[in-house]
Image: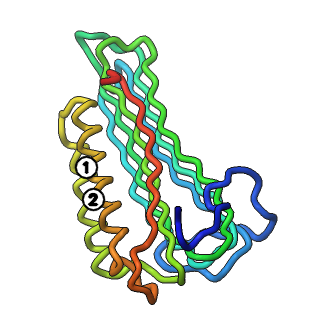
Amino acid sequence: MNPYLSRHFLRLGLLAAGVATAATGGPAQAAEVAVTSDSVRTAVNHRHHTEFRDSFSVHQLGTVTAARLGNRANATSSGCTADDACRSVALSFQIVTLSGHDVHLNAVNKGRAVNDHCNGCQTLAGAYQFVVSTPRPGRLTAAAQRRLADIHRRLDALGGSRLPAAELKRKADALAAEVTALLARPDSTTAATTTRPAVRLHRHLDGWPSH
């Protein structure tokens, strides 16, 4: 249980009415509702055989009373054959930092992969959502941002590989574990505390083949 947010932290449903605000790069002023959304989509077919796209977004919301977060990855392969297979990969990493008490959080994180008459195709959609809470507002330190940028570069590098979907899934999971470990360090943010930030990872992967 997150020591800084109330039992309402994971409650899904309607959020309190208020002015919607979203921030990237630095903490925002306190708001009634903070809203942020990220998505990535790939689609391949017999004319366009291979596509890899990734998103790596950092949103530093500051102090909020409620937040609505959305992160989606969608990959589609259609109309290819086993002798002329396609490869469609969409990966979205969303990092959100926030602080506050009795915060109402509505977090949606979905990955969806579709094979439409595409025998032998490699299709992978992965959505990773990292929610970081601290007792006081703060921003990610310069050192933490440099390490996140390095992880982002390695995520981008997967696009140039020809790894099968199952191996890409393992690589993405390993990068997500690095992000989680980094964000959980007490020195990852400028919040005035020696306590480790609370980090919750929402992970949703969908793919073909399924193993």
Residue at 59% in and 60% down: 36
- Position in image of residue 76 (x %, y %): 44, 27
- The secondary element bearing badge 2 is classed as helix
Q: In the figure, 4 relative to 70: above or below?
A: below
- Position in image of residue 153 (x %, y %): 25, 59
**Colour scheme of this structure image?**
rainbow
Query: Which residue is disc 2 drawn over?
Result: 178
- Position in image of residue 71 (x %, y %): 52, 50
CA neighbours of label 2 inside 10 A, class few (<14), some (14 to 19), many (20+): some
Q: Quadrant of the C terminus?
A: top left
Q: Residue furthest right?
A: 17
Q: Is residue 5 left or right of residue 19?
A: left
Query: Which residue is disc 1 drawn over?
Result: 174
Residue at 42% in and 49% down: 128
**Three-letter amino acid code at disc 2?**
Glu
- Position in image of residue 182 (x %, y %): 31, 67
Judge by depth and name the residue closer to the eye, 174 or 193.
193
- The secondary element bearing badge 1 is classed as helix
In the rendered structure, are the residues bearing label 1 and label 2 in contact, judged by CB atoms less than 8 Å apart? yes
The quadrant where residue 23 appears = bottom right
Label 1 vs label 2: CA separation? 6 Å
**Three-letter amino acid code at disc 1?**
Ala
Residue at 39% in and 57% down: 56
Q: In the figure, 30 relative to 68: above or below?
A: below
